[in-house]
Each structure stands twice: as C-alpha cells, then as structure tokens.
Image (tube, rainbow, N blue to C red):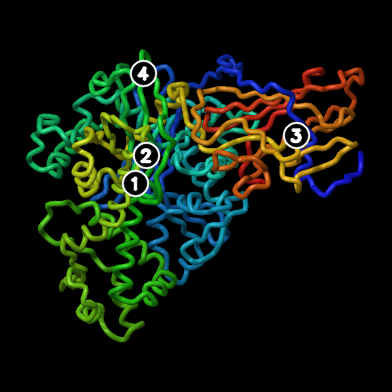
Amino acid sequence: TSAYSSPAKSLGDPGITPLSPSHIVKDSDADDAVEQLFLVVVAIDFGTTSSGYAYSFTKEPECIHVMRRWEGGDPGVSNQKTPTTILLTPERKFHSFGYAARDFYHDLDPNESKHWLYFEKFKMKLHTTGNLTMETDLTAANGKKVKALEIFAYALQFFKEQALKELSDQAGSDFENSEVRWVITVPAIWKQPAKQFMRQAAYKAEMATPENPEQLIIALEPEAASIYCRKLRLHQMIDLSSRAPVNGYSPSDTTGTGFTQAKEHVRRNRQSRTFLVENVIGEIWSELEEGDRYIVVDSGGGTVDMTVHQIRLPEGHLKELYKATGGPYGSLGVDYEFEKLLCKIFGEDFIEQFKIKRPAAWVDLMIAFESRKRAAAPDRTNPLNITLPFSFIDYYKKFRGHSVEHALRKSNVDFVKWSSQGMLRMSPDAMNALFKPTIDQIVQHLSDVFDKPEVTNVKFLFLVGGFAESPLLQQAVQSAFGSRCRVIIPQDVGLTILKGAVLFGLDPAVIKVRRSPLTYGVGVLNRFVEGKHPPEKLLIKDGTRWCTDVFDKFISADQSVALGETVTRSYTPAKPSQLIIVINIYSSEQDNVSFITESGVKKCGTLRLDLTGTDASVPNRREIKTLMQFGDTEIKAVAIDVATSKSVKVGIDFLNY
C-alpha cells in the first residue's frame, strides 16, 4: 500500500473509481428467485393501540379470515383486534399479551404489580427515536427498561403462535411455520431503520430467517389499505359526500347514526369472521379511468399517513405518485390532550406520581376514557361520563389533603364537572376540544398534500384506519375536502389494512411503481479537476491526483422506481493491484448530494469483495459491477467482479452503522 502524501484523509477509503459510462438497466427478470409455494398468507397489523391478524389460504384467495374472537374485551369497543399491550414477569419472561396482559396486570396487588413489566403503545418509539439501533430500550409502566427488539419479538412470536394454533385447529393437523408467508404492516412514513427493525424482530421471533427473507413481507399500511379499497363494492362503504342512500340508509339521519346502522348490518353478517373479496374490481373502481388519482389517508392510533396513488390499466396496477407523508397525528393525540386536562385540574405533580405509584389504575382510567372517546360525535348534546378509579380518588385525597370534587370546583375548567356517582362529566364541547389539535393537524397536512403539483385532480379520498371510525374526524375531512373529491370510508374500517395486507401477501407485485424515500449512492474517488473540486478533497495516491469522498448517486429521493428495477454502475479499483475491494453505500434525505461528508449522509451498507486467490491474469482495468435493486420495501445491493464472476450481496442496513 502506498503512503498518502496529501492533506485529504479519505473517509471510507473507497479505493474505487467509476468506469464510464454509467447506465440504468430496467431488468424485469431481475427476480430469478423461485417463487416459493406457501399454503397460507397471514398478515399481522401491529398497531400502536391495537393489533390483530387475518389470513387467507392461497387455494381460495377470495376468502379472508379475521382472527378468532379474543378473550376479554372492553365495553363500547368492538374487539376484532386486541390491545397492543404486553406483560413480562418480574424475571423478564413473556407472560401475556392483549386483554389478558391488561387484565392480569390490573388484578395484581399494587405492591406486587410494581415488579411486573407492562408495556403499551410502544410502537411509537420506533417512529420517534432518531437513531434507532438493535440496542434501543423501551420503558415499562414501572419505569424499568427492556430492549425494544425483545418486546417486539415477543409480540410477533405471540401472534405467530396464535395464528399457527388457529390454522392447525382448522386443518385438523399441525401447521408448520414454513407453510406460511407472513406479512407485517408498518406506517409508510416510518424511516428505513424502523422498517428494518421490524424485520429483525420477526427473525428473532423465528417467522423467517435472513437466509429465507422472502417468507416475510414488510407491507406499508396505506398501500395495503389502497389494495383493499380497490375491491370495495358499493354496499361495503359509506360515501360521506353522497346524499344517495348508502346501504339503503339515507345519510340525512346524520353520518353518526348511518354509520351505527351500517355497523349493525356488518355485525349481523359477521358471525363467520370470513370476508369474501370478490375477484373483481369494485364498482367504485370501475368509475376510475387510466391515470385517475386517489389518496389514501390511514389514520391510526399513533400515526397518520397518506399516499397518493394512480391507476394503471388494464390490470389496475397502482403507481405511487407522491411519496408517503404524514406524522404522529394519531388518536393518541386525543389521549394526550386528556392527560393535559387532568394535569390542569389535579396538578402535573400528582398525575406523574399517580402514574408511577398506581400504574394499573392509570391504565384503567385510560380505558374508561377510550370508550367515551369513541362516543364523541359532532352532534352530541348529552355529557360524557368518565369513571374515576377508586384508587385515583383515594390517592388524590392522600396526596393533596382535599377531595377530587374540591379540585374540580377550584380548577375553573368549566366544561368538566363532578357527578355524585364518582365520575368526571365532560360536556360534548370539552370532549371535542380534546380532538381539535389532532384533527386540525391532519386537515392541515392534507391541505399541504393537496397543494402539491403532483396531487391535482384527486377523484377519491379513502379514509381508513382505526381513527377513521371517529365521526369528528369524518366530518372534518368531509367539510374540508368534500368539494374537491369524494370522501369514502370502508365499512369495518379498522380492519381495512389487515385485509389489504392479506391481499398484498397473495400478490406482492400489485404495486408496480414506488417513490424512493431516500437518495442512495456509493463513495468513490474521481480524478481531481482543478477549479471544480474543493482543494481539501485532494488525495494523491501513487502520483495520481484524486478527489476523495465523492457521492456517486444511484437513485434520488422521490424518484419513481419500478418494482424490481435494478440500477447498475461499473467501478474499477483505483489501484490495479488491489485485491480487497470495499464499496460503502450511503443514503441521504437530500436530493443533490456531492460528497459523503455532507451533513445528513449516513452509511447504510458495505460490500466487501475479496479477490485474493483469483487468477492473476485479469485485465489491468478490473471491472467491478455494482447493482442496487429497488422497489421492494427492502433494498438489496450486489457487487460482481466481471472477470471472475465472484460476487457479494448485502441488504441495506440502517441499524448497525
């Protein structure tokens, strides 16, 4: 190796330089992988507040089965899904999930419960953690920390076992994991590390292995919803903009009641838990023509994300027109406002202490709030009562020396009163005020998306996800955008994503064009050009003047990529005798990146090609081909030495760099 005789320290010592010309290969046969035959597709909708799974046998793809009813369940909340809560024993072993975890935790003696580790709404941590790694921690209700990866793996393992058990019971014989293709849904606005984190957790839960990654698909929530919405028949949705009867009910009875009746109607037909998805394009879809655009707004517990799709006929493939956007505007925001209100009435110091000292009672209070939150509606006139747990009233008296009733009288919060049955009485206006900040953010964000040039002429807006059940959100979206497009809500809207994810697992090629969320490239050396390259990047190696740290771009953020599209570049070692070739892959959220040292550029992969022991008679300019395959929710990179066909493969990794 030669000594460096220059001021520049090369960051990753790329040691490779581009062979021109660079070209892009559209390679439709890129996927030579033999299509594995799975007997069944199981999709898991791992939500912030609630989760569930559904499945379909590949032999009868038109039937989607939603998981069995769960034990437990709350008053006022339909329990087709289970709360995303998990309980570990004091020894940190998995104990239970969902209602079972919640109820068990709740029934523990307070002195004992503080040793148990209870987690809820932990999925948001993946969205809010800037530098997510395999080591990221989650905090239990009692303040103890556990590795996030373990919690996610426990949760996925729980669903895996439940689903396999249900499938085995149905089949009358043991169902093997190898016969299942798994689909896990994640928000489209999650950054790449969070998507990869989900995959790692699934490997830890032994759903699939790094050697057989095809067994697991990470699907984007709004995309899954979009696939399902294509299949909708008119009787399966509520069109907020139409004044024609929906389902034979006239919407003039106010959306609220129409929706309840529609729900009744669905409930009667739902003894079987099996949904027929007719193998047709739904009626609403038949009104869409080539090139038509629609927007899917997926509003859940933690995040709201939106995707704009365009139809490509004849098969009705989808093309993503505008990269997924959104933010943490889920229904959790309403819970947060309620907590702020409690702090205002009872004092932040008390609420903080109460959460730590009586975590199970706090959970109870939030459950009571949840069922009232679902009763909020634009035209409601009677107050909403929220039961305060006895230990709240008791602990407050100990803490402050006066009663809860006294605190309410003193707090000047006009809309919240104390009722003699031990309840907080909230006027409908007070409840609506808790929704307002979150709903305003959703509407604002949607307006911004509608103003983008790519988003003109949107025909439909599909409102999906658990939060879409809220009449307040429905009304806000309808009054803000009803004049621009038709606002449509699938019935059973909380299960839309689940059903769409099953359809996606049955036919992953349905989404043909995506937008790349990041710019990708590799670090290279270029010949140094005076006046063009900054002098501090000059690197002199064996008498040749190089410009170091150059970012050689493969694809830009927000560029369209077709499914399976491969971008190829050719490089040659800067030094012909070099036998170990290291290619570093970098990503950035910015479009135009010149150097890998710029801020926001992150290393996300390394290809290490070892050519020692290969035939020495190689040409003096060795060609190293580098390919990146995009379009799937995961990205793969390969480097090939053309002379010897030696190759090395790597998945882009955002967690370990």
Quarter residue 272 falls in? top left
Residue 598 in percent (x, y) is at 64, 47
Type of amino acid under label 1: His
**Residue 40 visible here:** no
Residue 136 in percent (x, y) is at 58, 54
Tell me the SS state at disc 4.
loop
Tell me what residue is drawn at x 57 percent, y 57 percent: 137
Identify the residue under disc 3.
526
Give the distance between the C-alpha atoms of the residues marked 3 and 4, in whole angstroms.
45 Å
Identify the residue under disc 2.
306
Q: Nearer the viewer, residue 132 or 146?
A: 132
Give the distance between the C-alpha atoms of the residues marked 3 and 2, in whole angstroms.
40 Å
Q: Residues within 10 Å of mark 2 (few under 14, many from 20)?
A: many
The answer to whether the residues at label 2 and label 4 have Cβ atoms under 8 Å apart is no
The answer to whether the residues at label 2 and label 1 have Cβ atoms under 8 Å apart is yes
Q: Residues within 10 Å of mark 3 (few under 14, many from 20)?
A: many
Give the distance between the C-alpha atoms of the residues marked 2 and 4, in whole angstroms.
20 Å
Type of amino acid under label 2: Met
Tell me the SS state at disc 3.
strand
Type of amino acid under label 4: Gly
Give the answer, above or below, for where 531 lies relative to 273: below
Give the distance between the C-alpha atoms of the residues marked 1 and 4, in whole angstroms.
28 Å
Question: Which of the image's four quarters has the N terminus?
Answer: top right
- Residue depth check, mark 1 versus mark 4: number of the one nearer the observer: 1
| Residue 624 falls left or right of residue 497 | right
- Residue depth check, mark 3 versus mark 2: number of the one nearer the observer: 3
Type of amino acid under label 3: Asn
Give the answer, above or below, for where 31 lies relative to 353: above
**Residue 324 visible here:** yes
Tag shown at residue 316: 4
Tell me what residue is drawn at x 46 percent, y 57 percent: 119
